[in-house]
Amino acid sequence: MKILIKNAWIITGNSQNPVIPSGYITIEDNEILAVQAGDCADQSQFQEVIDAGHKIVAPGLINAHMHCYSTFARGMSLAGTAPSCFVEILEKLWWRLDKRLEKDDLYLSTLIPILEGIRSGVTTFIDHHASPMCIPGCLDELERAFEFIGMRGILCYEVSDRDGSAIAQKGIEENIRFIQKANARPNGLVKGTFGLHASFTVSDATMRQAVAAAQGLGVGLHLHVAEDHADQTLTISEHHKRVVHRLADLGVLGPKSIAAHGVWIDDEEKQLLAQSKTAVIHNPRSNMNNAVGAMDLLGLLKYGAIVGLGTDGMAGALWPDLRTAALIHKHEHRNPRVVWAELNTLLANNSQIANQFFSKPLGKIMPGAYPDIVIYDYEPPTPMHQDNILGHFLFGFAHVQAQTVIINGKLVLRDHQFVDVSTANIAASSRIQAEKFWKRFAV
């Protein structure tokens, strides 16, 4: 199918020619053919012509650390005393929740954040999944949701020894099976990588087995790293090493690996992450919500670390976390001048991280890239050019919905409505399933 987007105010995502105030984009199947200023001379060749109405057209966003399975916790009450620290949050909420998930829960709890993410301009999730009673086959349920809507995804299963060695082994096998299946399809929307929970819940033996399997499959490992001081305290007590040193010694780090959070790490650990080219994912709103602290973003960037941005399951939308990143570090440093250009770095790094999994570029509007493109319902009320795009991002169209979204050359959202998808029916089904889940959770 050939698509033309015309009358577009294009943000290309490229350092050269980052803004085209009035131009057009041509797409054929799953590739961008041309990005030009002005008007397209021959429009008759296109099956679909989209008039952007001089609104903003930008590359789809990538959420670099997401937990779709957290959906059914929305609005759910916890019996008893509320958790007082991060470990209690895990024990009273998330580790109870993941063990009560059934396969019927997984598809719907994945659909909801996908729909919400797309509405906000996110076209790719890098998801980190846990449902120990749904192995094998749990990642297939997530994949089914991604493919039904048409969103791009990079999925893994969170291996942990917290539920015993048999469950850990099943988790390893789920990752292997899914990676072999998903990554064998060159143009597939969904890819696989290898998941681990965190240093303090994974034994040396399990970690070595996961590392060997991941290396044999040509992927890295996606795990939580020093999200809370408990990860450091328990790792030092059990293994006599700090978290990042232990991961480095066991071969977990590397250019294909993803370390989420990185809040409680020292300078040596920051340097190790940077030198290994491990991607470190900042999740500012989740860290604030869990009261674990704020990542030293400037310190990591100083050492040359690849730092991306995620939401940790707080929401599918990435814009709130980008704006939070702009604010929290000013607050932490008591300095209004810090963390501005670094926000562009986070978005660019998200694209770099995701591009390792796909054969064509993501996060850019240029010939040869995947056509993951968002038209925002935003007409700049002040001049917009390459030097002030970020100001418009954070204080303008970060607060509006996507009007039209194309993923992999397919129209997914048109004029604020999902194509061939009833969101009302999905939400109704999700409410019914969530109520069943809440009853299970309460037992």
Image (cartoon, helix red, strand yellow):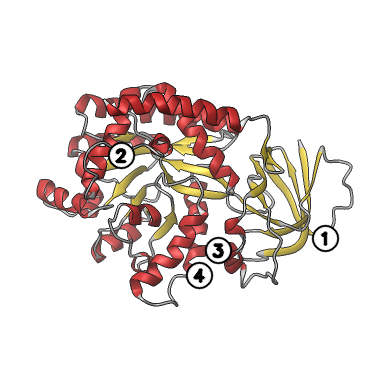
Between the C-alphas of marks 2 and 3, the distance is 33 Å
Callout 4 amino acid: Ala
Q: Which residue is mark 3?
A: 394
Position of residue 197 in the picture relative to residue 185 (left or right): left
Q: Secondary structure at mark 2?
A: strand
Residue 341 has which mark? 4
Compare marks 4 and 1 and give the one earlier in the sequence.
Answer: 1
Local packing at callout 2 (Cα closer than 10 Å; few below 14, some 14-19, many 20+) is many
The answer to whether marks 2 and 1 mark residues whose Cβ atoms lie closer than 8 Å is: no
As displayed, is residue 378 above or below residue 76? below
Residue 38 has which mark? 1
Quadrant containing the C terminus in the rendered view:
top left
Compare marks 2 and 1 and give the one earlier in the sequence.
Answer: 1
Local packing at callout 4 (Cα closer than 10 Å; few below 14, some 14-19, many 20+) is few
- Which label sits in the foreground, 2 or 3? 3
Local packing at callout 1 (Cα closer than 10 Å; few below 14, some 14-19, many 20+) is some
Residue at 45% of width from left, 66% of height from top? 326
Compare marks 1 and 3 and give the one earlier in the sequence.
Answer: 1
Q: Which residue is mark 2?
A: 196
Position of residue 442 in the picture relative to residue 69 (left or right): left
Callout 1 amino acid: Gly
